[in-house]
Amino acid sequence: MTALSDLQVDIDESTSAPALLSVRDLAVSYSGNLKEPTVADVSFDVHAGTTVAIVGESGSGKSTVVNAVLRLLGDRVAVGGTAKFRERDVLGLRERDFRRIRGRHIGFVPQDPTASLNPVRRIDRQIFEAFTSSGLPEYAKPKRFHEQAIELLDSVGIAAPERALQSYPHQLSGGQLQRVLIGIAISQRPALIVADEPTSALDVTIQKTILDLIDRLKADRGLAVLLITHDLSLAAERADTVVVLNSGRVEESGTSADVLRRPQSAYAKALISDIPSIDPDRFAASRAERAQPDNEPALAVEDVHKVFEVGKHRTTALGGVSFAIPSGRTHALVGESGSGKSTLARIVLRLEEPDDGRVLVAGQDIAHLRKRELRDARRHLQLVYQNPFHSLDPTFSVEQLVAEPLVRYKLGSRAERRTRAIEVLDLVGLDETFLARGIRQLSGGQRQRVAIARALSLSPQVLVLDEPTSALDVTVQAQILQVLVDLQVKLGVSYLFISHDLSVVRQLADTVTVLRRGEVQEQGATEDVFSNPTSEYTRRLVESIPKASTGSTRGPSGHVRSNSRKEVIS
């Protein structure tokens, strides 16, 4: 097949061609009454060979728009407007008729591959099922399914397709599972791929690899891509057209370059200002207000080793890692999945025993404490998990959640614990009216503030922050980062910050350790490591950060803007 990069296209003729998908005046009401819509007046076009990104905060209506187009909202939800695929309004089709389009002509790549693949069926069986349901003539012979599945996984860049086919989902990495889902989607030979946050849970290098794969498939096969993301920097780098949603309405749309460089709406301007890579020094002034650190580090990790043994197989998770965090400062751990970040965090928290080395909290080696001594030491070392939707008990009120650590340590009376809960909620920007609320009544950002307040209730010296903003959109992420910086200024608390988002690391961390397969690749001041990486691995990580400062120069149909009538598609 001829790649699009080898084709000469007439700009005027191509832009006048009908859109592959044309959405007009889309409205959705979960109450069933379109006079009270959740989404209203949404319009956009997706042309063959182009990428359109729908961008917005959580609750902006991105997923509602996609689910409406894919007919996944259910019968009780009212949907108005039109969504024409190949000039046929799919919203008016019977479900039986639309099933022939969904999957076969419109592929779908969901956000979470672990929730989308059957955990008790091998990968080959799930791919074979897609072959059988496609109705395509090339999949008419089940005897060839194994060979075709290997070819499919090879085409999406899985290095050992035979092994992957024989695996269950839990035996593959997140990046491999996402590739499997992309493979299943393209196996149907669709004209349009809908990708809903396809890389939000992936490391930066794996994210780049997956997005490069989608771009290559788009070029090789002429696919159109509808990309749903809260990451405006990613959209600016990868999409031809960006549609910005806010509260179910289109705030702004246009070429990615125009939206990024010349935003017209206040909402789009705010989203852009919150992109971490736009302003690496966003929190520099606040961080400069922190007190000078004490001579003794708040946390010191000294030559920590860890090897896991399963049968005869030995895996070195950590091969001698050392670093120190002064009081009131932030040290980041970065690296791809399997680099040893989580293992090291578990050792620091004494949830895992090191084979060798020491972990010092305020000068005390907690790696070898007895149970009772460890309980006392853990008051000074608290954890904030990645996902507040999973880490907080939904049956508890906010007051119960924040006060629970005090109850566990038998500290204070009930009235004193309530007072402390109010104090720490105030520190994270929530007032006492939140005390009686349940977690389901809170937004993602509010939940993460509650999680931080809970960790602060015991007045710890060190917080271990495990991807604390990765599940949040850029605006809420910026708010949480500001909370963390303000807490360092007020309390002098130290952070061990674990993240795959290097742009956030650059904004927040004073020092950084880059891990790869348990070995330290590079370590030092964050600015030095990012500006002048000495290892090839670190250089590759830094180069994988989405370049929000340079938007696409392509027009709304994906063609390079030029005064010339003829252009080569790039």
Image (spheres, grey):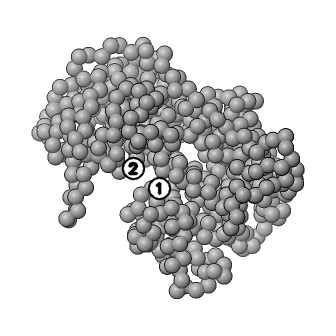
Depth order, front residue of 279/384: 279
Percent across and percent down for residue 438 are 47, 40
Q: Residue at x 50, y 34 (%)?
A: 503
Secondary structure under badge 1?
A: helix
Q: Earlier in the sequence, mark 2 or mark 1?
A: 1
Percent across and percent down for residue 524 are 34, 29
Depth order, front residue of 319/180: 319
Q: Is the residue under label 1 in contact with that under label 2 (CB below 8 Å)?
A: yes
User: Which picture quadrant has residue 387?
Assistant: top left
Circle 1 Cα neighbour tier, 10 Å, few/some/many (<14 / 14–19 / ≥20): many
Depth order, front residue of 436/465: 465
| 377 left or right, relative to 287 | left
Depth order, front residue of 161/98: 161
| 366 left or right, relative to 279 | left
Q: Residue at x 35, y 23 (%)?
A: 329
Q: Amino acid at mark 1?
A: Gly
Locate the N terminus by quadrant.
Answer: bottom right
User: Which picture quadrant has residue 300?
Assistant: top left
Provide the residue designation for mark 2: 337
Provide the residue designation for mark 1: 175
* Vertical side of 374 occupied by 200: above or below: below
* Vertical side of 82 occupied by 288: above or below: above
Q: Residue at x 21, y 47 (%)?
A: 306
Q: Amino acid at mark 2?
A: Ser
Label at residue 145: none
